[in-house]
Image: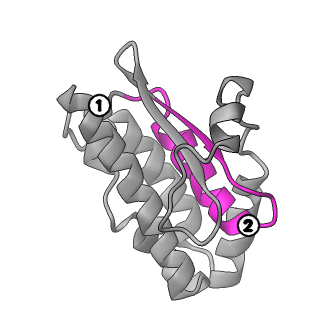
Amino acid sequence: MGGNVDNGAAAKLDAIVTDFADLDPRERLELLLEFSEKLPPLPAEYEAQRAAGVNRVHECQTPVFLWVEVKDGLVEIHGDVPPESPTVRGFVSILQDAFSGMPPEDVLASCSSNLVQRLGLVEALGMLRVRGLHAILHYIRERLRRSAAN
């Protein structure tokens, strides 16, 4: 199961990558903005932690907060990104959509640093934003690795 190319997370991501593939950079941004509108609000149980600055991805200029947990053997991702940062918000929404409900091994196998390139976002976004997106991926991988080690 884990590491299998046909894992559920990879299949979900491949479908999203395919949606982005044939678009020009402007259209990719528009699709990313559509994803930003799909990011659910942060569950109430995390609001106090967010207010205290817990789980912030510090490498991002945008205040991004992520909760990456494994419950009953499946990944749960909850994120909070301000509406005034729709590209980052859209990226977090894509990751939440693709990875939540998947086994951690599948997410780790799919959560590669080339995802930003596969989505064609390098051309659509500036280097500073791309660096932030890579930091988000790194944060998710590190949280899952720590979870697996415990």
Find residue 41 and report its image quarter. top right
Query: Does the rendering let one see residue 119?
Result: no
Percent across and percent down for residue 36 are 73, 55
Find residue 148 and report its image quarter. top left
Find residue 126 and report its image quarter. bottom right
Instruction: Decide: is 142 above or below 99.
Output: below
Q: Quadrant of the C terminus?
A: top left
User: Which residue is located at x 62 percent, y 43 percent?
Assistant: 79
At label 1, the amino acid type is: Ser
126 drawn magenta: no
Mark 1 secondary-structure assignment = helix
Q: In this view, does 124 lie to the left or right of 29?
A: left
Numbered mark located on residue 93 in the image: none
Residue sitting farthest toward the front: 52
Q: In this view, does 79 lie to the left or right of 120?
A: right
Where does label 1 land, which residue? 147
Numbered mark located on residue 85 in the image: 2
Rounded to the nearest angstrom, the CA distance separating label 1 from label 2 is 29 Å
Mark 2 secondary-structure assignment = loop
At label 2, the amino acid type is: Ser
Q: Residues within 10 Å of mark 2 (few under 14, many from 20)?
A: some
Q: What stretch is highlighted in magenta?
A: 76-102
